[in-house]
Image (tube, helix red, strand yellow):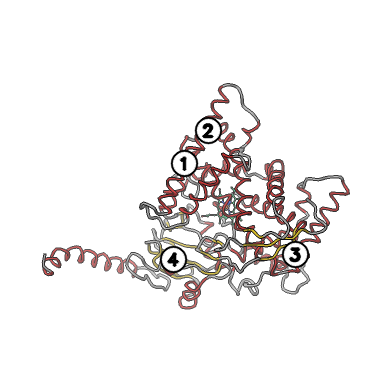
Amino acid sequence: MSDSELLFCLSPSILTLFLLLILMKRKQNRFNLPPGKMGLPFLGETIGYLKPYSATSIGEFMEQHISRYGKIYKSNLFGEPTIVSADAGLNRFILQNEGRLFECSYPRSIGGILGKWSMLVLVGDMHRDMRIISLNFLSHARLRTHLLREVEKQTLLVLSTWKENSIFSAQDEAKKFTFNLMAKHIMSMDPGKPETEQLKKEYVTFMKGVVSAPLNLPGTPYRKALRSRSTILKFIEQKMEDRRQRRKEGNENLNDDDLLGWVLKHSNLSREQILDLILSLLFAGHETSSVAISLAIYFLPGCPSAIEQLREEHIEIARAKKQAGETELNWDDYKKMEFTQCVISETLRLGNVVRFLHRKAIKNVRYKGYDIPCGWKVLPVIAAVHLDPSLFDHPEHFNPWRWQNDNNRGTSSSSYTSMTDKNFMPFGGGPRLCAGSELAKLEMAVFIHHLVLNFHWELADVDQAYAFPFVDFPKGLPIRVQHHHTACI
Ligand code: HEM
């Protein structure tokens, strides 16, 4: 075919594309959109937005866009026209208006891999039903009666394998801890058993796919993860069958006290819904908490006075327990971990485990004079608020004392703390606030308790938390540990 014939054949498509662009432009002109640019056709600015950067910063892309356009700007991301918000007020407004003006809207690839019944992708009544089940299972009462004991047991199991002067990946250890905890809590699987190890192995492949480009081609991490997904689902299904069989035979046992037992007994979810719920809770509860614990291990050696104050707090708790003749931590001990809570908040603020959320406008919305057209993607960037110097003094510094109400280090007052609280959203907000936030804080506190009581640690190699945008340590955060002479395990 000659060049002119080719041009002739292609011209209708070129013309259609051209007309579409003009129509879109016209439609956009009706709105007072925030400033910004739409980038390349289709790709938009996605590549620049997703370029890895230090997790304790907002990255070059965000910095440049905010300084050029302000905290609310338009762009084209993930193949869709998008409003990006680094504005604390707009972020709160978006999350509080879930279901009314905005709706959760993760990329389709997430649904492909976590499943169409995953809580991350569900909206409306079905989301509400699944959420009630998760909240029931992660309730305050269960935290006190079941989970605290299990969290401590799994912490000690991991820490007891740490050898004097050895170097290992702190990130792998944190993952081991949170995975074992979730596997036990969800399906009563014991750590170290072949079936648990097998599931963990599949899960690693699965995770690599969740965070990779969604290319379903032979050999890609995404394709491998889809295969792992079906292996994991078969595994969970087998567990379900075993339970049903046991129940038929009147052989129910204590194991049914886990999430699987609970949904089988108390919900009327379909087989497919139970599978996706279990898989997505395993994902939500394991990845995030392990990153948060790794970040605490990473930040603390850079702030020796925080380690010192943590040790004082935990030695005092351990001493009181010894005097009372108790061994296991209880809820009152947990409530005494006040400075530890400041360390946890500061770790979540500076490290930003979840950096931004995916939403879309379901109505035309007007905010501070700007229009957000119905159907547009909306990204509330919670990390940008946590690292905003107009809201947090020296946001790049790890400063747990900023969270104390009556701190004696100069910066805080009650009004300052209530303002920081308002702008602090590591667990999201509104009707989709993280269902596991209390469990995550409990895991971090108990892990820190035994860590500071028993070990001194230092970073054994230069490593850094990167946002890919999921947070990861490229070298796995290698640390060298020494036992404290006053070891308590
Ligand atoms: C430090 C650790 C954690 C962080 C930073 C975190 C963060 C978040 C965030 C930001 C959301 C909101 C997502 C959105 O609105 O689109 C969320 C949702 C959720 N998280 Fe967490 N999370 C953590 C730990 C956990 C744990 C331990 C569990 C327990 C299984 C859990 C279960 C969930 C569930 C079920 C949802 C969905 C809630 C809903 O859609 O109603 N998370 N998490």
Where residue 180 appears, x then y in whole percent?
A: 62, 45
Earlier in the chain: of badge 4 and badge 1, it is 4
Please report the residue visible at 61 percent of the width from the left and 57 percent of the height from the top.
Answer: 171
Earlier in the chain: of badge 4 and badge 2, it is 4
Asked whether disc 2 touches disc 1, contact meaning CB atoms under 8 Å apart, the reply is no
Q: CA distance from mark 4 to mark 1?
A: 38 Å
Please tell me the numbered disc located at residue 83. Answer: 4
Where residue 255 appears, x then y in whole percent?
A: 63, 33
Q: Left of 279 or right of it: where is 23?
A: left
Tell me the element at label 1: helix
Please tell me the numbered disc located at residue 240. Answer: 2
Tell me the element at label 2: helix
Residue at label 3?
Answer: 307
Q: Residues within 10 Å of mark 4 (few under 14, many from 20)?
A: many
Query: Can you say whether 216 is above or below 49 in the image?
Result: above
Q: How many marks?
A: 4
Q: CA distance from mark 4 to mark 2?
A: 43 Å
Asked whether disc 2 touches disc 3, contact meaning CB atoms under 8 Å apart, the reply is no
